[in-house]
Image (cartoon, grey):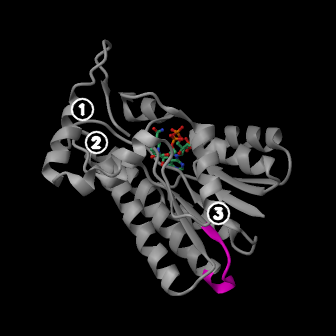
Amino acid sequence: MKALITGATSGIGQSFAANLSKKGWALILTGRNEEKLKEMKNSLGGSVEIIAADLAKREDVFRVYEFCRDKNVDMLINNAGYGLFGKFDETDLDDEVNMINVNITALHILTKLFLRDFKKNDHGTILNVASAAGFMSGPLMAAYYGSKNYVLKLSLAIYEELRRDHSNVRITVLCPGPVDTNFNNRAGVSFSVKPITADYAADYAISKALNGKFFAIPGLVVKLGTLAPRFLPQKLLAAIVYNIQKAKKTSDGKEKALK
Ligand SMILES: NC(=O)c1ccc[n+]([C@@H]2O[C@H](COP(=O)([O-])OP(=O)(O)OC[C@H]3O[C@@H](n4cnc5c(N)ncnc54)[C@H](OP(=O)(O)O)[C@@H]3O)[C@@H](O)[C@H]2O)c1
């Protein structure tokens, strides 16, 4: 079995790689950090191919797909992504558009191209990494939450299309709360609740994906949190999320955010 993992150089992606490698899977790993990819190829053992790519660039997304096509990939893991913190009118536009390119556009393109191949063979699994943020609006992290809503809703729609087709192709969406990775440093935030480990998040998601489950929401508190939109009006929920985030200032002036 073979998996393509995006964002494999750090955090949850690195844990996906270690987990599947231990299970004997062949891997194709991508990320921008070529040195880290080479290091992982040497340390993981087994069959590991690497391709450095910046998924904010459309041409790199297609280059990754071309590298993988005809290699009999069984699982696509769309994991690359990052967040930005700040009021919407104050966050950097270029950085935010790049984030949309990585979190949404690259995931969209790879999902479509691999889904077409998987459907031809009536075989394959797509594991999209969204977030608990995908269930709600996120004042002070507006575009990030919006991007994860897209990932969740797109994946759910594809799930239903596959179900109606009686397809053997599977799609799973991972929606974690805080995970202990480099995410916070990139987003410029600190944790508001105790994070789970990247290894746990990856193991949980892979076991759901291999069992054909759609939702992978690790942790009881986060699971309950994702139910909030069913019971609370959207505007009230947005106000709650704003207050939680705003109240989480740390002594060094950083602010904490829900992921
Ligand atoms: N950590 C959390 O609390 C949390 C919670 C919910 C969801 N998530 C989601 O989990 C996923 C993985 O994040 P993480 O927590 O593991 O963070 P991380 O440690 O910062 O890892 C992010 C990964 O994304 C890759 N990446 C970022 N920009 C890229 C670009 N332009 N092109 C290609 N690859 C790029 C990075 O690789 P390079 O730097 O090598 O490019 C890195 O491997 C993300 O989609 C994130 O939104 C995280």
From which residue to which does the magenta span run?
119-125
Of tags 2 and 1, the one toward the viewer is 1
**Which mark, by number, is residue 40?**
none
- CB atoms of marks 2 and 1 within 8 Å: no
Which element is circle 3 on?
loop
Q: Earlier in the sequence, mark 2 or mark 1?
A: 2
Q: Earlier in the sequence, mark 1 or mark 3?
A: 3
Residue pictured at 48% horizontal, 31% vertical: 195
Q: Disc 1, ligand 1: is the CB inside 8 Å?
A: no
Q: Which residue is mark 1?
A: 244
Residue pictured at 41% horizontal, 47% vertical: 223
Say which quarter of the image contains residue 244. top left
Q: Nearer the viewer, residue 56 or 124?
A: 124
In the image, is 208 to the left or to the right of 184?
A: right
Q: Which residue is mark 2?
A: 141
- Residue 138 shown in magenta: no
Q: Nearer the viewer, residue 24 or 203?
A: 203
Point out residue 239 in the picture as x, y percentages from the top left corner: 15, 41
**Which mark, by number, is residue 211?**
3
Residue pictured at 48% horizontal, 50% vertical: 217
Label 1 environment density (alpha carbons within 10 Å; few <14, some 14–19, many ≥20): some
Q: Quadrant of the C terminus?
A: top left
Which element is circle 1 on?
helix
User: Is residue 90 in view from this perspective?
Assistant: no
Q: Quadrant of the N terminus?
A: bottom right
